[in-house]
Amino acid sequence: MLDKITITLQAGNGGRGSTALWRGKRPYGGDGGKGGDVYFEGSTNVAGFGRYMSKDVYKADNGQDGLPLNKFGGKAEDLILQVPIKTEVVIDGEVKHIIEKEGQREMILSGGRGSKGNLSIKKHPSWRMLTDEERAGETAEVTLIWKLTTDIIFIGYPNAGKSSLLNKLTNAHAKIGTYEFTTLEPQTGHMGDIKLMDLPGLIDGTHSGKGLGTDFVQHTENCKLIAHLVSLENENPLDKYQQLRKEIKLISQELFSKPEVVVLTKADECNPRKIGEVEKSFEKLKIKTATVSILDDDSMSEVRKFLKTQLQ
Ligand SMILES: Nc1nc2c(ncn2[C@@H]2O[C@H](COP(=O)(O)OP(=O)(O)OP(=O)(O)O)[C@@H](O)[C@H]2O)c(=O)[nH]1
Ligand SMILES: [Mg+2]
């Protein structure tokens, strides 16, 4: 899923004015038509920017040239480029538009004016033919950024079991691995109408570029709830959790302040007495937890319920 792309856009040029002369003397040339504008339009049917990888330049049509017998050239059709909901349009390093709704249209570039033909100019002596430059449509390099919207995001150290849980709860087929950093890109899935996302693992020092870095933060901006996964394989899961919370604070204060719950994973790797103690240690700090093992279907139903309730 391509969530960022830079493309060149070009609006259509205006048509030339006709210089036709009736019997070689009397001007009777028509005006040129306006060049096409360029728009972005929000669509819920579009995911990512894969469709904009095929061309170097996306260009609207040119206006038609004016013709003899005072025929006016037609206005060109506008170029309407569909983008996903929550697309930011960045031009010259500045966010110029945010596409938030289905059908929302924003004009990005305006097509060039058509030149007057010699007949119009004869009638209005102050007018003159436009040069090629004056008829040219606007052009710009535009960066599109898709801010994914997600209800719940899974975060945690590598190997915490984030992707495994995502696959169990949703239709996703994220890669699972016994090694660290199996997940390199955010993965998404739907649990009913709730959208879940699994992020690459975080480690101490992620904020300063260690591991897979902090590019993922942009995806967390629109998310409602963080599920922080902590493996019960850890000697002291609460310590481990608090250690990563420190790191998250350094990565992004906004992410740190989001509503968060804890999911204790790999319960099958831990004895029940210890699980009870760990749950209590979180409870003492008023941190809500659910305990799961992907091998235990009952715990899956529980965590489903837990996440739904916490989201509300
Ligand atoms: N025993 C047991 N193993 C689990 C459980 N959940 C995940 N695992 C194993 O833990 C390992 C890591 O799982 P992943 O889901 O890839 O972990 P991750 O958090 O997505 O890891 P990264 O993508 O590297 O950040 C895999 O070998 C899984 O099979 C569980 O509930 N019980
Ligand atoms: Mg993973």
Image (cartoon, rainbow, N blue to C red):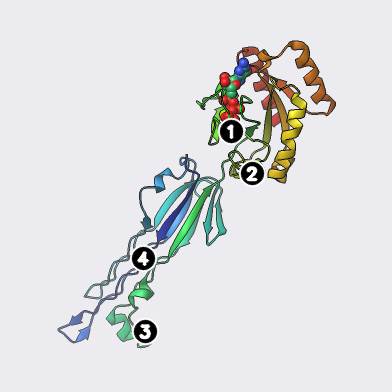
- Foreground: disc 1 or disc 4: 1
Q: Nearer the viewer, residue 249 or 207?
A: 207
Mark 1 or mark 4, which has the lower sequence index?
A: 4
Percent across and percent down for residue 291 are 70, 19
Disc 1, disc 2: CB below 8 Å?
no
Mark 2 is surrounded, within 10 Å at the Cα level, by few (under 14), some (14 to 19) or many (20 or more) other residues, namely some
Task: Estimate the x, y position of residue 18 in percent, counting from the top left.
Answer: 25, 76
**Which three-letter amino acid code belongs to the residue tagged 1?**
Met
Q: Quadrant of the C terminus?
A: top right
Vertical placement of 222 versus 274: above or below?
Answer: below
Mark 4 and ligand 2: say if the CB distance to the nearest ligand atom is below 8 Å: no
Q: Nearer the viewer, mark 1 or mark 3?
A: 1
Mark in the foreground, 3 or 4: 4
Residue 197 has which mark?
1
**Which of pointers 3 and 2 indicates the residue nearer the eye?**
2
Q: CA distance from mark 1 to mark 2?
A: 12 Å
Q: State ligand 1's quadrant.
A: top right
Secondary structure of the residue carrying tag 2 is loop
- The foreground one among 133 and 29 is 133
Instruction: Name the residue tied to disc 2.
Output: 221
Q: Earlier in the sequence, mark 4 or mark 2?
A: 4
197 with respect to 291 (left or right): left
Q: Which residue is mark 4?
A: 35
Q: Between marks 3 and 4, how big is the CA–CA gap? A: 20 Å
CA gap, disc 1 and disc 4: 43 Å
